[in-house]
């Protein structure tokens, strides 16, 4: 097997490389991520991956393509489905095509490691692309090593990004942190399931809109005594003054 591993960043590659090597598979990393913005962020992630590849002695192929203008033009009218309609297909097709043209017979991706990515969609997309282009897709659920990979990445000082990549995800990340804060305040654990529940109530696809957070939370958790108590206390204070 000659494996090309599409790699989104150094932290996400840590567990993937380790687990593949434990299987006797030596991957070649492939960087192609025009979805990462702004340029300072793109450079920070790319350069960190370069250093990590040297550290662990793995081959890395860099396909430099900072693509803010092209990315925005292609997702402007489909922001809520940009990942499925453009971002994943753009990057993973490019990886498949590079593999086919350069003697690789198998492709996989570190996107299968992140608990925040659309795992099942990526799996289906990769199988479809591999069948179309004439390659094998190596599927692994790398999420099982999520915490181990994160702990190792932090221990060795890798650059740890705060959002997925594009400028829109950066905005959503900030709103997501505010959502977590609000949920904790009313005694709701900010688990993935609870966050997803709020997103579904917001009726905005995968995008969280700051001005709709409180209304969406109220719909998702209509019978929350702690939130009602906070509201009552605020009301009392307002009347008192």
Image (spheres, rainbow, N blue to C red):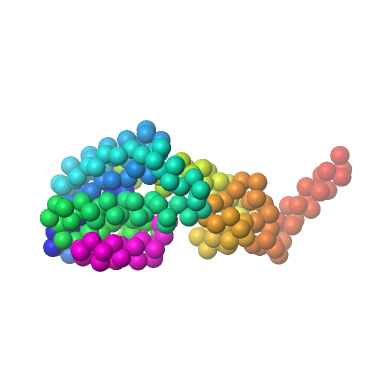
The residue depicted at 30 percent of the width and 39 percent of the height is 65
**Can you give x and y, in whole percent of width and height, for residue 108 in the image?**
25, 59
Q: Nearer the viewer, residue 199 or 121?
A: 121
Report if residue 14 is visible in the image. no
Q: Is residue 152 magenta?
A: no
Q: Is residue 19 left or right of residue 209?
A: left
Q: Which residues are magenta?
A: 116-140
Residue at image coords 20%, 64%:
134
Residue 150 lies left or right of residue 57; in this view the side is right
Evaluate whether residue 100 shows in this view.
yes
111 or 92: nearer the eye?
Answer: 92
Q: Position of residue 75 (x, y in %)?
A: 46, 47
Q: Is residue 73 above or below residue 219?
A: above
Estimate the x, y position of residue 234 in percent, counting from the top left.
78, 47
Q: Which secondary structure type mostly characterizes the magenta part of the structure?
A: helix
- The C terminus lies in which quarter of the figure? top right
> Which residue shows up at 12% across the image and 55% down it?
103
- Residue 216 x, y percent position in the rendering: 65, 56
- Seen at 50% across and 51% down, the residue is 78
Quadrant containing the N terminus in the rendered view: bottom left
Q: Is residue 241 above or below residue 119?
A: above
Along the line of sight, which residue is nearer the eye, 111 or 71?
71
Q: Of 87 and 14, which appears nearest the observer?
A: 87
């Amino acid at each position: 097997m000659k494996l090309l591993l599409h790699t989104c960043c150094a932290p996400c590659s840590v567990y993937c490389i380790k687990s593949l090597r434990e299987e006797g598979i030596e991957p070649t990393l492939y960087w192609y991520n025009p979805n990462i913005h702004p340029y300072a962020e793109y450079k920070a992630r790319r350069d960190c991956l370069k250093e990590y590849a040297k550290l662990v002695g793995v081959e890395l192929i860099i396909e430099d393509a900072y693509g803010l203008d092209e990315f925005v033009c292609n997702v402007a009218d489909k922001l809520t489905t940009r990942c499925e309609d453009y971002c994943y297909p753009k990057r993973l097709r490019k990886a498949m095509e590079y593999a086919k043209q350069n003697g690789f017979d198998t492709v996989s991706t570190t996107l299968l490691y992140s608990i925040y990515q659309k795992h099942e969609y990526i799996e289906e997309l990769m199988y479809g692309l591999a069948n179309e282009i004439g390659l094998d897709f190596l599927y692994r659920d790398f999420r099982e090593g999520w915490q181990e990979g994160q702990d190792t990445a932090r221990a060795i000082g890798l650059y740890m990004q705060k959002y997925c990549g594009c400028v829109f995800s950066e905005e959503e990340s900030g709103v997501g942190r505010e959502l977590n804060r609000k949920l904790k305040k009313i005694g709701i654990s900010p688990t993935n399931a609870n966050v997803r529940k709020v997103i579904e109530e917001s009726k905005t696809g995968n995008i969280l809109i700051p001005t709709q957070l409180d209304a969406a939370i109220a719909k998702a958790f209509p019978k929350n005594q702690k939130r009602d108590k906070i509201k009552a206390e605020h009301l009392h204070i307002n009347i008192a003054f």
